[in-house]
Image (spheres, rainbow, N blue to C red):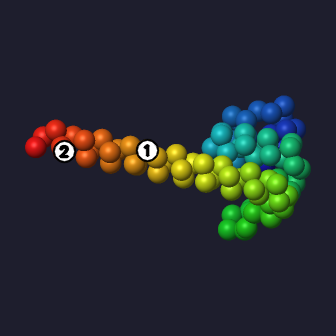
Amino acid sequence: MVLYCIANNYDYSETAVKYQVKYTNLYNWVKRYEEKGKAGLEDRRGQRKAKQESRTPEEEAQIRIAQLEEQVKYQQMEIDLLKKVKELERRDR
């Protein structure tokens, strides 16, 4: 059906009606076929993604630093909130 659509000057509407598929699905299939060829149309549902390229120790360290900085930021907000609650409780007494 993808080849039929391409052969008919990318007439997505006609092809979608002929093969009883959604226009958007057909459009995406044609796009994938043009980008990756026949392999782009293979059903990959349920398959694991390819392994990510291994990171250098420096990249791993940068990622870990960013995670820890985010954690510290969150914990500081939590501390500030608790201080504020404590202050408000003192005022109410």
Q: Residue at x 43, y 44 (%)?
A: 77
How packed is label 2: few (under 14 Cα within 10 Å), some, or many (20 or more)? few
Report the label total. Answer: 2
Residue 87 placement (x, y as % from top left): 25, 41
Q: Is residue 37 left or right of residue 29?
A: right
In depth, the one of 50 and 15 nearer the eye is: 50
Question: Can you say which quadrant of the picture contains the C terminus?
Answer: top left
Q: Residue at x 57, y 48 (%)?
A: 70
Q: Is residue 63 above or below residue 85?
A: below
Quick one: label 1 or label 2, which is nearer the N terminus?
1
* Residue 52 seen in the current view: yes
Q: Secondary structure at mark 2?
A: helix
Q: Is residue 12 left or right of residue 53?
A: left
Q: Amino acid at mark 1?
A: Met
Disc 1 versus disc 2: nearer the observer: 2
Q: Secondary structure at mark 1?
A: helix
Mark 1 to mark 2 CA distance (whole Å): 18 Å
In depth, the one of 10 and 84 nearer the eye is: 84
Residue carrying label 2? 89
- Label pair 1/2, CB-CB below 8 angstroms: no
Residue carrying label 1? 77
Residue 62 placement (x, y as % from top left): 74, 51
Q: Residue at x 65, y 40 (%)?
A: 24
Residue 14 placement (x, y as % from top left): 71, 36
In depth, the one of 66 and 47 nearer the eye is: 66
Q: Is residue 7 left or right of residue 86?
A: right
* Residue 18 seen in the current view: no
Kindly indicate the quadrant of the structure image that contains residue 11.
Answer: top right
Q: Amino acid at mark 2?
A: Glu
Q: Is residue 64 left or right of residue 79?
A: right
